[in-house]
Image (cartoon, helix red, strand yellow):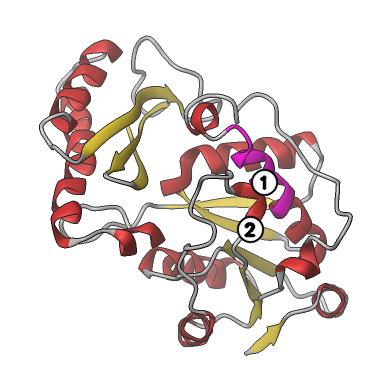
Amino acid sequence: MQVIASVFDMQSTAVNLRSKGRLIGLVPTMGALHEGHLSLIRLAKERADTVVVSIFVNPAQFGPSEDYAKYPRDLPRDIALCEKTGADIVFAPTVDELYPRGYSTYVTEELISKPLCGVSRPTHFRGVTTIVAKLFNIVRPDIAVFGQKDAQQVAVIKKMVNDLHCCIDIVTAPTVREPDGLVMSSRNRYLTASQREEALIISQALKRAKEMVDGGVRNVDRLVAEATHLMGTRRRVRVIYASVVDRCTMEAVREVLPGKAIMAIAAWVDEVRLIDNMLL
């Protein structure tokens, strides 16, 4: 497995691979890899000849008071996990490599990025679309794999790819959860045992909403009220939003059409911000 740090070397490698007819699969990550990330690598291996995993903690998608400085980083461990899972290349550039002095160009999506996380993190998705567009230009993938756990991010990237005529297939992998239901996230490392126990209410609220829909409930207000009530029973949990939205546009819906909506939740568990969602 190769480890590449420079943009020039990664671009040169990608051009060489494509000249040989190799299909390139990209798995963009911020490191601190867990089983959810590894499932994306495995899926990419099924779809592509060469799998590139990018590892880069992107400063552009963190707000000024967010956790960029303390975001978990362990590159040697991540590289070992990538190799064990079968990745062919790890692209791990520095911040200066991707955002050199004088950098001033950004990519924005102006519709899907606005609701949900876009309300409390107004610059977040600008950072996401910018770094993903850069990775697409550097790695030149045929497919890119993202997790359903980050549903709004996936929808924003799909819109960017469509609007900018990028010839890349965006593959969405199923959410991976811990045995007790907690969605896998790099930020779970921040949680103490007691915080983690209370964080379980987020997935439990989503599961309850799904049960209600399966039981015939279509009224969004009822679903949101039930989920919010459940999360309100935990002292450490503060709901940022609980919304039922269209899977593609992230627009709020008034009534659930099964197979077309998701419930999305963001919440603070003390000072740890977590997101989760469930297809309805």
The first of marks 1 and 2 along the sequence is 2
Over which residues does the magenta segment extend?
122-131
Image quadrant in which the C terminus is located: top left
Q: Is residue 88 left or right of residue 106?
A: left
Above or below: residue 72 compared with residue 170: below
Residue 168 in sight here: no
Residue farthest to the left?
233
In percent of width and height, residue 240 lies at 36, 30
Residue 47 image-quadrant placement: bottom right
Q: Which one is nearer the viewer's eye here, 133 or 257?
A: 133
**Residue tagged by mark 1?**
127
Above or below: residue 204 compared with residue 181: above
**Residue tagged by mark 2?**
58
- Tell me the amino acid under the disc marked 2: Asn
In percent of width and height, residue 104 lies at 86, 47
**Crowd band around label 2 with a 10 angstrom C-alpha radius: few (<14), some (14–19), many (20+):** some
Q: Are discs 1 and 2 less than 8 Å apart at CB?
A: yes
Residue 162 image-quadrant placement: top right
